[in-house]
Image (cartoon, helix red, strand yellow):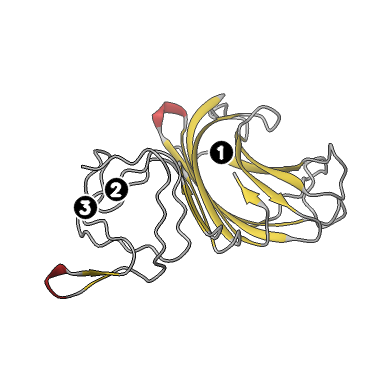
């Protein structure tokens, strides 16, 4: 075992390869696991030669405990995945829905610059009254028009939500519904890069079956030219 408390530099920029009898050519070969307590900068390629899966115990090929960013094009961390230079992303979260648009949780937040747009898809599952399940599958087209139509607007009647497709199965199939509303954050001005908060709340046609609160799991994905999806 060798402990190197400082910086290690490898001058050879040739890719590491394994030849006959496991002979190693090139820069650095790590045959087993690799534990990096702080940061690692890799200017060229990274090849993982051990076929064993990495594990938290520090054995196997490659294990990343936190998030990982690859050249700014792919990020994996916690419940979020972003790829293709910010052109595609997905997040998973657990939230609590309520029966009012003003108080329900935000299912996802899309951040757009002026003149940009993205398609957002939602897959949502929650618990309805009497412990029955409720699901929602929806697709939204969100565009930044500096506050002008057809930009989404939760103050209109009916609100402009950008929803292009939605399908729901709610409880026992009565008059229950899962409603979508999208609120742009114009607090810093309508014509600047801003957040669009996508919210879902429970509703019914008068039966009173819509739960006041409901635990929910959301998977949201975005494709387009956007700043972030959270």
Element under disc 2: loop
Q: Nearer the viewer, residue 89 or 99?
A: 89
Residue occupied by mark 1: 175
Circle 1: is it few (<14), some (14-19), or many (20+) Cα within 10 Å? some
Which of the marked residues, 1 or 3, is nearer the chain's N terminus?
3
Circle 3: is it few (<14), some (14-19), or many (20+) Cα within 10 Å? some
Q: Nearer the viewer, residue 188 or 32?
A: 32
Which of the marked residues, 1 or 2, is nearer the chain's N terminus?
2
Q: Is residue 30 left or right of residue 186?
A: left
Q: Quadrant of residue 37?
A: top left
Mark 1 in CB contact with mark 3 (< 8 angstroms): no
Q: Is residue 17 above or below residue 72?
A: below
Mark 2 in CB contact with mark 3 (< 8 angstroms): yes
Residue occupied by mark 3: 32
In three-dimensional space, the C-alpha distance between marks 2 and 3, rounded to whole angstroms, equals 7 Å
Q: Any mark on residue 98, and which?
A: none
In three-dimensional space, the C-alpha distance between marks 1 and 3, rounded to whole angstroms, equals 59 Å
- Residue 217 position, x and y percent, is 47, 38
Between disc 1 and disc 2, the foreground one is 2
- Residue 196 position, x and y percent, is 71, 45
Element under disc 1: loop
Q: Nearer the viewer, residue 166 or 40?
A: 40
Between disc 1 and disc 3, the foreground one is 3
Which quadrant holds the N terminus?
A: top left
Q: Any mark on residue 34, and which?
A: 2
State whether residue 172 appears in this view: no
**Identity of the residue drawn at 26% across and 53% down:** 61
Q: Quadrant of residue 208?
A: top right
**Identity of the residue drawn at 78% across and 45% down:** 158
Q: Residue furthest bottom?
A: 20
């Amino acid at each position: 075992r060798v402990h190197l408390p400082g910086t290690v530099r490898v001058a050879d920029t040739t890719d590491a390869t394994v030849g006959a009898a496991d002979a190693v050519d090139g820069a650095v070969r790590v045959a087993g696991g690799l534990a990096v307590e702080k940061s690692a900068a890799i200017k060229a390629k990274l090849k993982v030669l051990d076929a064993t899966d990495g594990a938290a115990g520090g054995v196997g090929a490659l294990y990343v405990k936190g998030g990982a960013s690859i050249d700014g094009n792919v990020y994996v961390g916690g419940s979020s995945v972003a790829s293709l230079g910010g052109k595609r992303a997905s997040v998973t979260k657990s939230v609590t829905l309520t029966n009012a648009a003003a108080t329900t949780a935000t299912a996802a937040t899309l951040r757009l610059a002026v003149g940009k747009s993205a398609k957002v898809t939602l897959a949502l599952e929650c618990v309805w009254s009497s412990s029955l399940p409720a699901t929602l599958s929806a697709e939204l087209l969100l565009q930044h028009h500096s506050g002008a139509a057809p930009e989404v607007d939760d103050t209109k009647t009916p609100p402009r939500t950008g929803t292009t497709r939605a399908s729901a199965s709610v409880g026992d199939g009565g008059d229950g519904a899962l409603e979508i509303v999208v609120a742009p954050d114009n607090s810093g001005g309508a014509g600047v890069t801003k957040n669009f908060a996508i919210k879902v709340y429970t509703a019914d046609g008068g039966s009173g079956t819509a739960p006041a609160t409901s635990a929910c799991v959301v998977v949201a994905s975005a494709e387009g030219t956007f700043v972030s999806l959270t």
